[in-house]
Image (cartoon, coloured by chain):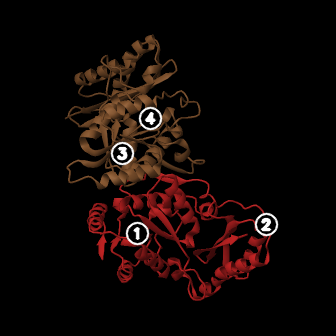
Chain colours: A red, B brown
Amino acid sequence: MEVIQSVALLRSTLQQKKSGIGASLKAPVGFVPTMGYLHEGHLSLIKAAREASEIVVLSIFVNPLQFGPTEDLDRYPRDTERDLKLAEEAGVDIVFLPQVEEMYPGPVKTTVSVSGITSVLCGASRPVHFDGVTTVVAKLLNIVQPDKAFFGLKDAQQVAVVSQMVQDLNMNVDIVACPILREEDGLAMSSRNVFLSKDEREQALVLSRSLKAAEAWVREHASFRAEDLRGAVKAVIEEAPLADIDYVEVLTYPQLEQPEAVEAGVPVRLIVALAVKFGATRLIDNTILTLGK
Amino acid sequence: MEVIQSVALLRSTLQQKKSGIGASLKAPVGFVPTMGYLHEGHLSLIKAAREASEIVVLSIFVNPLQFGPTEDLDRYPRDTERDLKLAEEAGVDIVFLPQVEEMYPGPVKTTVSVSGITSVLCGASRPVHFDGVTTVVAKLLNIVQPDKAFFGLKDAQQVAVVSQMVQDLNMNVDIVACPILREEDGLAMSSRNVFLSKDEREQALVLSRSLKAAEAWVREHASFRAEDLRGAVKAVIEEAPLADIDYVEVLTYPQLEQPEAVEAGVPVRLIVALAVKFGATRLIDNTILTLGK
């Protein structure tokens, strides 16, 4: 496994490795962009990339551009040594560790911005967040030039936004959405879980439980108003006294628009998405429901 | 020469052509993006691309996104048949004629935006213009994936803005700036020149004359204030009664910032840039002055 910090060296190394690939049914380059502090969720993305591609590139970059001024950039957990060990075990070929000074050598002049689907959910509570995400993902995709890039559905809005950007800007890459990984007790894996106190960790189980409840609820309601499903999910979360709800929303996926009333037999894909704070730690989770088929 | 309308066919054709290139000192793909109605200026870009690259791709696309609601999108001159003939004669390998429906299948959600250098000169008079330029150039560069892309310095701000975008987004392409081509009498070549009446055409010569005057003026003034150079240029243009000045500016290049006072022996690169209307036709021109060396 090679660990590379500079853009130029990454490009030349990749070019060399690509020229050595023979005929193959796999994609030449699979890319997993991360902010590090790897957990099983990231490892599942690496696994998917490993199976689909000849060369697997993992990037670790805590992107300052996607954190608001009052957010947890400085507090975001980092452990590069451990990350490199996990990446090597998972079969990564190249770890790209871009440096802030090379990624943002001066004040940011060029921004890639997706409108509409970025103004709801996390985009509503974190107004600069998605411009930071799309700008850095565009940069990373241009640097690595992968054939496939792997994103986790825990941030389903991010997947929708990045897919929209790739489509709109004709970027030559397949965005592969991978399922959420959960702890045995149901908590969605997240680098931020380490911040939870014992009580918070326990009460945070209400999130996955509320989504399970949503899945059960739609099995019992063939036709319904999204507002009622939302209310059912909210009611479950409110059982946890430490849960401070940022949002609970039911939207179409991947358009992220308010759904019409759901009718039995009419196909629709909905996302139940939530962001909830436990103490200072903000967790997100979601489930995507394919209905009416 | 192949003429291709669809993105997918362009990509597969290019891939096939690229795989047939042997060892070469030239770049594999050189790209000349245009809005068509080709003139000698465009042909000089094709010539530069032809000399530097194995495969030359010319695109012709009148990009609706870069025209404001009151601008001349519908009136912009088009003559694809003649363009194709000129392109073939100039040695183009592939003409890409993207269709508006494929480039913008729905309302535009993703925008690439460069701040700062887009708020002066043409960006001040045409507020949505450069977002449209950067967004379509990003799309075209992602579709064609050239090694070099050729732009004319007549729109020097466009060259600066596109170069900034390419640098900031780590796009893997060299932007090659090519000199302005002029008619024998000095008028900068432009597709819009066909709109000039006989009187306007004659008086439009004041533009290149004012820039020549600027070049003479700085030879006589080793130290000066930009404002005085600007005044000297304006005075020349104002001699033409039909000239309706949009702007005349003296800025640093390519930063497009207000210069400090110019001192003898202190190296600085300035652009004298102007936009002037003759009747309904808005012309731009500029000269770049390398001083103090």
Mark 3 vs mark 1: in front: 1
Cα–Cα gap, marks 4 and 1 = 36 Å
The quadrant holding residue A248 is bottom right
Q: Is residue A73 above or below residue B126?
A: below
Q: Which mark is residue B35?
A: 4
Query: Where's residue B196, x and y in %?
Result: 46, 17
What residue is shown with label 1?
Answer: A30
Q: Which chain is mark 1 on? A: A
What residue is shown with label 2?
Answer: A263
Pointer 1 and pointer 2 on the same chain? yes
Q: Is residue B262 above or below residue B282?
A: below
Pointer 4 and pointer 1 on the same chain? no
Question: In terms of secondary structure, where does tag 1 sit?
Answer: strand
Looking at the image, which is closer to me, B213 or B107? B107
Query: Where's residue B56, x and y in %?
Result: 32, 42
Q: Which chain is mark 2 on? A: A
